[in-house]
């Protein structure tokens, strides 16, 4: 199997973003067809794998930037990871007042500050859930979603 992977990697070349192959179909990585027109895409398990990598990278970055991050409970950490996932870590850094309030463990005020942002007007349902999760430390999910293990 290793030789097959080595040969295909050499033939396909790695491209870290979506591109059009020689037939005009969207492809990514090492020749992975993702264009719906030709039956391409990824599985749910593959999407979860990628999401897990993204969450690990973002979490590592937040731990490095904020000494107080590790002291938060998992639900509140998840709010910051989710916001950074949605708008990038640099976008999250724009929430200066909110971050200072979280560091001071003033979660009610931090939640209120979150709701006065442009982000809250762009994704109001998500922002409301994340603000409530920050305020209470209790996990919030979109209606109709049943969390695993319950």
Image (cartoon, rainbow, N blue to C red):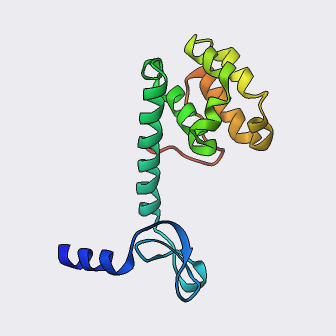
Give how far across and how far down residue 93 sits, in percent.
Answer: 62, 30
Q: Is residue 56 visible?
A: yes
Height in image: 85 above or below 107?
Answer: below
21 vs 134, left or right, is left
Residue at figure coordinates x 64%, y 43% from the top left: 87
Q: Residue furthest bottom?
A: 23
Height in image: 81 above or below 69?
Answer: below
The answer to which of 57 and 36 lies nearer the viewer is 57
Give how far across and how far down residue 16 sits, in percent.
Answer: 47, 63
Q: Quadrant of residue 12?
A: bottom left
Height in image: 104 above or below 3?
Answer: above
Residue at figure coordinates x 43%, y 28% from the top left: 64
The answer to which of 99 and 6 lies nearer the viewer is 6
Residue at figure coordinates x 55%, y 73% from the top left: 19
Q: Quadrant of residue 38?
A: bottom right
90 vs 31, left or right, is right
Give how far across and how far down residue 146 sits, in percent.
Answer: 54, 46
Residue at figure coordinates x 64%, y 44% from the top left: 142
The answer to which of 94 and 110 lies nearer the viewer is 94
Total count of labels = 0
73 vs 131, left or right, is left
The answer to which of 69 and 107 lies nearer the viewer is 69
Where's the N terminus, which quadrant? bottom left
Height in image: 125 above or below 116?
Answer: below
Give how far across and how far down residue 140 sits, in percent.
Answer: 60, 35
Q: Is residue 150 visible?
A: no
């Amino acid at each position: 199997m290793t030789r097959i992977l080595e040969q295909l990697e050499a033939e396909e070349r790695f491209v870290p973003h979506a591109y059009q192959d020689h037939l005009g179909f969207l492809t990514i990585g090492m020749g992975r067809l993702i264009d719906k027109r030709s039956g391409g895409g990824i599985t749910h398990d593959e999407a979860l794998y990628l999401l897990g990598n993204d969450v690990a990278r973002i979490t590592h970055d937040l731990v490095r930037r904020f000494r107080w991050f590790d002291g938060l409970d998992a639900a509140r950490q998840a709010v910051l990871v989710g916001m950074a996932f949605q708008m990038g870590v640099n976008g999250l850094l724009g929430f200066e007042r909110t971050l200072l309030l979280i560091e001071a463990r003033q979660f009610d005020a931090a939640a209120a500050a979150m709701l006065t942002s442009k982000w809250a007007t762009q994704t109001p349902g998500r922002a409301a859930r994340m603000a409530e999760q920050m305020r209470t430390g209790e996990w919030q999910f979109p209606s109709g979603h049943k969390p695993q293990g319950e």
